[in-house]
Amino acid sequence: MQLIQLIIDGVASGCIYGLVALGFVLIYKATETINFAQGDILMLGAFVAFSLIGVLGMDYIMGFALTVVIIAVFGFFLDSVVVRQIIGQPPFATVMLTIGIGFILRGFASIYWGTDIFSFSTPFSGKITEFNGLIISYVNLSIIIGTVILVLVLYLFFTFSRIGVAMRASSENQLAAYYMGIPVKFIFSLIWSISAATAAIAGVLLAPITLVDTSISLIGLKAFAAAVLGGFGSIPGAIVGGIIIGIVEQLCGTYENYLFEGIREISAYLVLILTLIIYPRGLFSDKAEVKKV
Amino acid sequence: MRFIFKTNYAQDINIARHSGDRFWYSLLIILMLAMPLLIDDFYLGEISYVCILAIAGIGLMILSGYTGLASLGHAAFLGIGAYTHAFLLTNGIPFFASIPIVVIVSFMVGALIGIPILRLTGMYLAIATLALCFIAEHVFIKWEHFTGGNRGMPVPQPEIMGMSFYDSATFYYVCLAFLILSMFAAINILRSPTGRAFVAIRDSEIAAQSLGVNLGLYKALSFAISGAFTGLAGALLAHYIGYLAPDIFNIFLSLTLLLLIVVGGMGSLHGTVFGAIFVGYLPQLIAICRDYLPSSIGSQPGLEPMLFGLILVLFILYEPLGIYGRWVKVKLFFQLFPTYKKQTFKKQKVFTKSDRV
């Protein structure tokens, strides 16, 4: 029973990793760049939600929606103004650029909001439900349900809407998509905005658990592990990878005494390195194997 | 403008291209040697720190600037170097025996980590080294027997030839000597077939492979050499800091090193020194900026990472060749005076090379 309890908690935190990883994957699939600032966008989302809900006293649902819109617009302009300029330069430049952007965001947050730890009230805070002796908090439940809804919406969007199909086409082959009259640059910026919105949603859902401060941007790094485990470039892979990382972390934390002390904090990174060494293509990779030397 | 008329192959790989180089670099070395007579003890310490940063920069430059592999985990090597050195000194090994051991240990660790990880390309490598940095920081905290854990670890200050490291002039000379040595070592590695193989890998892996470069071997070698230089810098850094704590060797330090090579200029050894001067004096620069800003912004702790990120972004966008690249441009402008063309340094557009097969 304790095991199931642990797994449920793990799934909840894993969903957050999965959502952030989803952001990486969307951008990677489309533009073959990795956005190292994803975690910082999540942090920004949580802070904006805090400002709207906690400070301005907005309704939770309204605040949530407005946060997502604000961050999505931010993501759009981040791509169309800054990141697009270095297309065609080696991957190193993109890595450095997005890291730099991450630092700017983190610095900005700590200047604007300060380094204190904030929280805001949500309809889920402090409520729990019992089911067959399992204790599930409403916060965890909201995260899991939120993730399921979001994934479903994204799935429908990519399968049935015109823009979604255009996005898939641009990811598949930029040149061919361009010939078909798809505005590829605009589509790429839209993908950045969707990815930023996903991070913002993860940030708002996460806020009741970790509270809001600048250190939550580190979640972005753990989400790398999720994305790599799922096979960078696969959307279901990102979610499943995230959930696995979440469960592994919970289990490592509980059975720390049997392993070695402090394994919880680095378990995600260990999984990441082991995946890269043993099975670098990841669990769900639909493309050919990661190029090996 | 000086044209060099080459009459034999050896001229191609001369360290000094012509007599002008020899003159100016000798002058520079003499100036550096005379430094303790010219300036105050405090500034001498600063310059020692710049030397240490430059050595670490050489390490990362060989990996990133010359082999084209991004590493976000070089703070781990600084940490390994620093802790190994401190551990050896504590156990009574003399300074000059400890340094080679540190270099060998860092080299081995670099090779060990490099062999499995370097089969990955581009961004995967960046992610893996990032993870490595966190794991290393954690190991420094938890392996208390070796590192003293969170309590930290004092670094013994040895004496060489009767002069203590507490004397900033002595320490300055030690750092300078190691910087010059590292510089020569790096120049020599880079003009040897090994170095040429690194550059070939950076420019095109496929072309390098077709010319018979063993990619896995040379990438691992590059990682190991890079680790060795950075480990050496770590050993000197241990003396500079005086008291080691695990949180010094965090991700921020890795990124500082990356900032160093980007600002200095990717793919040039001059760049490491320019970058080291920049990064070494950045905190002072920021402190000056704070005075001019309104106190509500100026006193914020977040200012430093923000400026740090801003500088990184601006350099990547507007001057990817860094300070050294700018210097080359300015020099060429005066050499060609009325006929300088901006297009000489126009960035060549490369179509995105797909990782997908």
Image: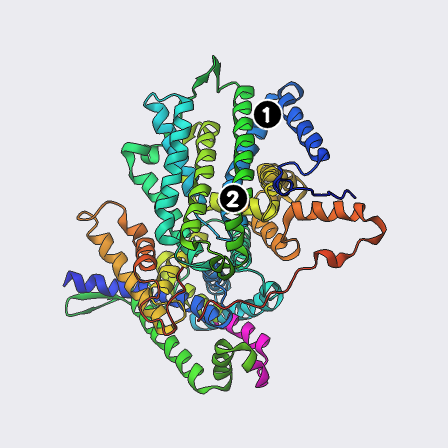
- Callout 1: residue from which chain? B
* Nearer-N-terminus badge (1/2): 1
Point out residue B107 in the picture as x, y percentages from the top left corner: 40, 39
Disc 2 marks which amino acid? Leu
Image quarter hosting the N terminus of chain A: bottom left
Front residue of B84/A42: it is: B84
Q: Where does the magenta region start and end?
A: A177-194
Name the side, left or right, on which A198 lies relative to B147: right
Disc 1 marks which amino acid? Leu
Q: Residue at x 56, y 51 (%)?
A: B309
Name the side, left or right, on which A211 lies relative to B39: left
Colour scheme shown? rainbow
Point out residue A43 in the picture as x, y percentages from the top left corner: 46, 59
Splitting the image into 4 quarters, where does residue B148 fall?
top left
Q: Regarding mark 1 in the picture, which secondary structure is present there?
A: helix
Point out residue B129 in the picture as x, y percentages from the top left corner: 41, 51
Residue A181 within the magenta-colored segment of the rendering: yes
Can residue B49 be seen here? The reply is no
Disc 1 target residue: B44
Instruction: Look at the picture and state if B235 lies above or below A134.
Output: above
Q: Residue at x 34, y 44 (%)?
A: B138
Splitting the image into 4 quarters, where does residue A84 fall?
bottom right
Disc 2 target residue: B257
Q: Residue at x 34, y 70 (%)?
A: A237
